[in-house]
Image: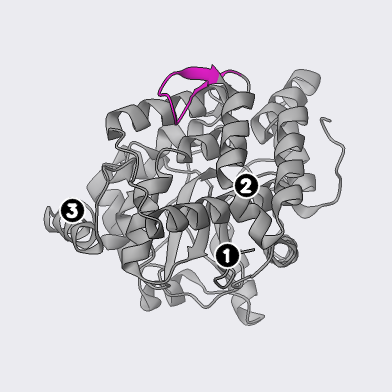
């Protein structure tokens, strides 16, 4: 068993706000006003006054870049059963707030239906739109961010240096964005492709120590290109507010259980990396150029084709690469009692497919992209568990 305290975990999810037909609508701020009156969230104005989103209380609903979105965040959890309950609760509260203004929420990483999104009011979001133009104007994407506790920044950077080679596998397992602007993109996760248009996004080189990490972040801000440190969109980064590593590479998951599986894998990766660091195991020296290719491959095919194997740098069937990930984090999962649950969750994804696979099945059956959104609404809220299976 592990001789150190179990690492805590928290999850943030971005959700689409859609009308009953399945079309995204800019009612996020109205829904947040409802949530704020209930003591469950912040309006865009409150969020702007609080900063750029780094300091919300655990358990919250807050705005995102686009008015067609809401973001939820769980409380800090110590086991995956808590994560499950928190995600169900906050998805339910987000949906209730949306219902109050004639809408629903859908856990889709991109909109299947073509839409011209509207930017959420506020100086920061306005600055981002002015600076980045079409990239920001079109950026209606929904991700999942998992925060895992670390002892301090030195341990956190050691973790970042060691988990980077495995992060594309998480993209493949969570792929949930095959459609873009009303058409099939050809990708399982087109969100990952659209997201990487931001100049501060993606894979990084190894840092070696916390001082180097913070210097890189400061140098990025000093270029005057990104608006602030909150726009350091690395695949994984240190939180600026909490003592956590934030794994940011995943699409939001249609099913709560898939999000919980992802959270378990992320915590397993962090604990495994921290153990390796304490034992003097060096970080894999894989170039970021190769990691970007691995991430592209994961976004392109999800779990249906080959992935780049983190240990060999060569293509291998997705099931084999996922099995290698489970083997890699196995002792850490065993220590937290998560091994069976995470292994079963991964097996379920490989058996029935990712969210991207489900979206395409519904589209094949109906020929209607709004039907895809409506199916996602049901799955997000837990009304139904059999659509597309």
Residue 199: quadrant of the picture: top left
**Mark 2 lies on residue:** 330
Residue under the image location 73 percent in, 60 percent down: 84
Report which residue position mark 3 lands on: 220
Whether residue 177 is visible to the viewer of this picture, yes or no, is no
Q: In the displayed structure, would residue 122 be above or below residue 160?
A: below
- Horizontal and vertical percent for residue 327? 60, 39
Q: Nearer the viewer, mark 3 or mark 1?
A: 1
Segment tinted magenta in the rendering: 305-316
Q: In this orientation, does residue 221 appear?
A: yes
Picture quadrant where residue 6 is located: bottom right
Asked if residue 310 is among those painted magenta in the image, a careful observer would answer: yes
Q: Nearer the viewer, mark 2 or mark 1?
A: 2
> Image point 50% across, 52% down: which residue?
272
- Counting residues from the start of the chain, the first of labels 3 and 1 encountered is 1
Residue hosting label 1:
9
Tag 2–tag 1 contact (CB < 8 Å): no
Q: Position of residue 117 (x, y in %)?
A: 48, 44
The residue located at (61%, 51%) in the rendering is 331
Dot 1 alpha-carbon crowd within 10 angstroms: few under 14, some 14 to 19, many 20 or more:
many
Give whichever of discs 2 and 1 has the lower sequence position: 1
Q: Viewed as shown, does residue 98 lie left or right of 375?
A: left
Query: Where in the figure is residue 383, as x and y percent of width and height?
Result: 85, 51
How far, Cα to Cα, is label 2 from label 1?
Answer: 18 Å
Depth check: 218 or 54 in front? 218
- At 32% from the left and 61% from the top, the residue drawn is 230
Measured in 3D between alpha carbons, the distance from the residue under mark 3 to the one under mark 1, in whole angstroms, is 28 Å
**In which quadrant will I find the N terminus?**
bottom right
CA gap, disc 2 and disc 3: 36 Å
Q: Residues within 10 Å of mark 2 (few under 14, many from 20)?
A: many
């Amino acid at each position: 068993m592990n001789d150190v305290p179990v690492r805590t975990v928290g999850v943030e999810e971005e959700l689409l706000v859609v009308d009953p037909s399945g079309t995204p609508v800019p009612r996020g701020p109205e829904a947040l006003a409802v949530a704020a009156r209930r003591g469950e969230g912040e309006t865009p104005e409150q969020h702007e006054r609080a900063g750029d989103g780094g300091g919300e209380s655990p358990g919250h609903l807050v705005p995102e870049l686009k008015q067609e979105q809401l973001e939820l965040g769980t409380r800090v959890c110590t086991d995956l059963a808590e994560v499950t309950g928190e995600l169900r609760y906050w998805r339910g509260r987000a949906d209730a707030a949306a219902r109050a203004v004639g809408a629903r929420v859908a856990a889709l990483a991109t909109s299947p239906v073509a839409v011209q999104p509207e930017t959420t009011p506020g100086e920061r979001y306005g600055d981002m739109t002015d600076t980045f133009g079409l990239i920001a104007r079109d950026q209606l994407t929904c991700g999942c961010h998992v925060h895992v506790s670390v002892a301090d920044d030195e341990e956190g950077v050691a973790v970042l240096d060691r988990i980077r080679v495995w992060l594309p596998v998480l993209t493949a397992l969570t792929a949930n964005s095959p459609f873009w602007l009303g058409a099939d993109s050809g990708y399982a996760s087109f969100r990952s492709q659209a997201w990487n248009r931001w100049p501060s996004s993606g894979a990084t080189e190894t840092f070696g120590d916390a001082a180097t990490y913070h210097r890189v972040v400061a140098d990025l801000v000093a270029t005057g290109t990104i608006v602030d440190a909150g726009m350091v969109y690395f695949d994984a980064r240190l939180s600026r507010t909490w003592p956590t590593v934030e794994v940011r590479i995943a699409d939001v998951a249609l099913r709560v259980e898939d999000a919980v599986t992802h959270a378990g894998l992320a915590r397993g990766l962090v604990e495994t990396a921290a153990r390796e660091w304490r034992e003097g195991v060096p970080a894999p020296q894989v170039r970021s150029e190769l990691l970007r290719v691995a991430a592209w491959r994961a976004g392109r095919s999800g779990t249906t084709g080959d992935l780049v194997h983190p240990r060999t740098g060569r293509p291998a069937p997705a099931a084999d690469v996922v099995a290698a990930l489970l083997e890699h984090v196995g002792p850490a999962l065993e220590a937290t009692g998560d091994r069976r649950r995470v292994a079963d969750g991964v097996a379920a994804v490989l058996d029935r497919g990712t969210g991207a696979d489900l979206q395409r099945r519904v589209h094949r059956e109906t020929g209607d992209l709004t039907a895809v959104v409506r199916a996602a609404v049901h799955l997000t809220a837990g009304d139904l568990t059999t659509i597309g299976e």
